[in-house]
Image (tube, coloured by chain):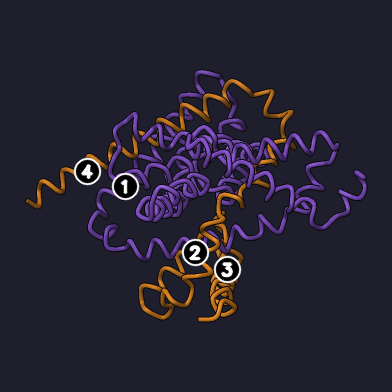
Chain colours: A orange, B purple
Amino acid sequence: MSLVFEFGVIAAACFAGELLHHWIPLPVPAGIYGLCLLLGLLLCGVVREKHIARAAGFLLRIMTLLFVPAAVGILSVWGEVRRMLLPLAVAIVPVTILVMAATGCSVQWMKNRQGRGEK
Amino acid sequence: MSALLQQSAYFAVLLTIGAFAVGDALHRKTGRDMANPLLIAVIIVAVVLLALDIDYAVYEAGAGVISWLLTPATVCLALPLYRQIEILRKNAAAAAVGVLVGVVSSAVLIFLLAMVFRLDSRQLATLLPKSVTTAIGIGISQELGGIPALTVAVIVLTGLCGNLTAGAVCRLFKITDPFAKGLAIGAASHAMGTSKALEMGEIEGAMSSVAVAVCGLVTVAAAPVFMSLL
């Protein structure tokens, strides 16, 4: 597939996601609707891997870079951040680590238990 | 010179890419999680903006094309997810438990925090959506009467923290299964964590995207309920 076509498919999924975001009154971004939509199309075979593989691979590889401008935005609310520094620090570091650990351990435990049940 | 830089259509883009390239090179050279390309890039950009006295709004306008690519990149997470759909089908129950644990543990911990620090309901609403992806979090914060700009900062810092600590947390808590790792990273630190999960492997990346999408949607439904309970 030509790269232009591949980006076209992705742009179409974004646009459809945007329409859903506009019509459904929930705080769900266009990207999440687009993701679900594109997954649905892949699963029912309307869109095939070869239709998006190269363009999608490129976007996924540079994804971390795409968060830089948003992250720099902390500068603009720095005053507010400083006022709540301690609770914010606790909310961010320990809470994030605990949520990650609790989720990971529970999933791994469930998966091991199921694995044993199958045998 | 400063005026020229402010008008330039490419300076902000170049600065962002350059800062990221430095971070990426340091990360490759040292091979350490602490040398996080995202964190290094943010620090470099912030220092340059402060040094040249350029407003964030000016930088944001120039670097907007980079942020603009986030929606198509998010949509593309459907691809690794599609490739790993079999694993997800086989472990649907484990994934559902993971999402539930992620959403509930985050809400409970934030509530405890609010009690300890005697936060008011405005501050609580600001912190509650901290683990979901930015666009969903802003909406929830607005809906519940939080401070959306501060919610964005908290979400970004949460993502940064997840991106930075994911490797160490998985080692420390002996989370070795790629499926579990992915869900954990996505549930705790949304799309910014997912970009780290993608670096770890395709299963990790795919499951992290599942967690981001499903936890986001569940939080939209659950946050007002939590808020009224708490």
Q: Are marks 3 and 2 on the same chain?
A: yes
Determine the residue positioned at 78% across, 53% down.
Answer: B61
Q: Mark 3 or mark 2: which comes first in sequence?
A: 3
Q: Are marks 3 and 1 on the same chain?
A: no
Which corner quadrant of the image does residue B187 belong to?
top left
Chain at numbered mark 2: A
Which amino acid type is marked by label 1? Pro
| Whole-percent x, y for residue A111 in the image | 21, 46
- Please name the residue that numbered disc 4 is placed on: A110
| Whole-percent x, y for residue A95 in the image | 46, 29
Cα gap from disc 2 to disc 4, whole angstroms: 31 Å
Query: Cβ–Cβ below 8 Å for labels 3 and 1?
Result: no
Chain at numbered mark 4: A
Q: Are marks 4 and 3 on the same chain?
A: yes
Toward the left, the furthest residue is A119
- Please name the residue that numbered disc 3 is placed on: A14
Which quarter shows the N terminus of chain B? top right
Left/right of residue B63 with respect to residue B165 in the rendered view: right
Q: Which mark is residue B178?
A: 1
